[in-house]
Amino acid sequence: MKIKELENPPQWLLDANTAFANVEIIDGIVHWNGGVWRDGIWHNGVWKDGIWANGVWKDGIWENGTWNNGVWNEGIWYKGTWVYGYWLDGIWKDGHWFNGKWYKGKWEKGYKRENRYKPKLVASDTQPSND
């Protein structure tokens, strides 16, 4: 459903710059099902799929999709593709990390690109590594 068709969407969602958004609100929680997040501040919710072009993530659950750029502050990443951005804190469950800055958090498993993909488990508060 389009954002303008939602009943009582949160202001942060209305303020965001998006394209082709497919969203639902289930039990008061925003569920992003597809589309492009061009810019804005995400304040919690469930990201099912889509493209994150830029913006600030301030908590929530990322289930799948492509992150192109921006700042991740907190939350749980289950899978998807991280192209570039700043990871400040959170839990990385699995996915593909291409490039960016990792500051702290918990990396459980996934693929970090460095000439080729290699799986690597990294301890909490440690930057993803292929060593």
Image (spheres, grey):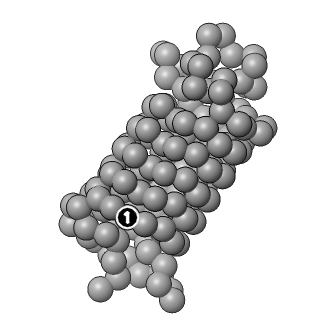
Q: Residue at x 31, y 69 (%)?
A: 127
Q: Residue at x 37, y 54 (%)?
A: 88
The location of residue 27, given as percent across then percent down, is 48, 16
User: In the picture shown, does residue 4 fall above or below 105?
Assistant: above
Q: Is residue 93 visible?
A: no
Classify the position of the N terminus by image quarter: top right
**Identity of the amino acid at label 1?**
Trp
Classify the position of the C terminus by image quarter: bottom left
- Please tell me whether mark 1 sits on a helix, a strand or a loop: strand
The location of residue 99, given as percent across then percent down, is 51, 72
Residue at the disc numbered 1: 102
Looking at the image, which residue sits at the far top? 7
Q: How many marks?
A: 1
Q: Residue at x 55, y 65 (%)?
A: 84
User: In the picture shown, does residue 34 fall above or below 124?
Assistant: above
Left or right: 23, with 74 as reference point: right
The location of residue 46, given as percent across then percent down, is 50, 35
Q: Residue at x 71, y 33 (%)?
A: 22
Circle 1 crowding by C-alpha within 10 Å: few under 14, some 14–19, many from 20: some
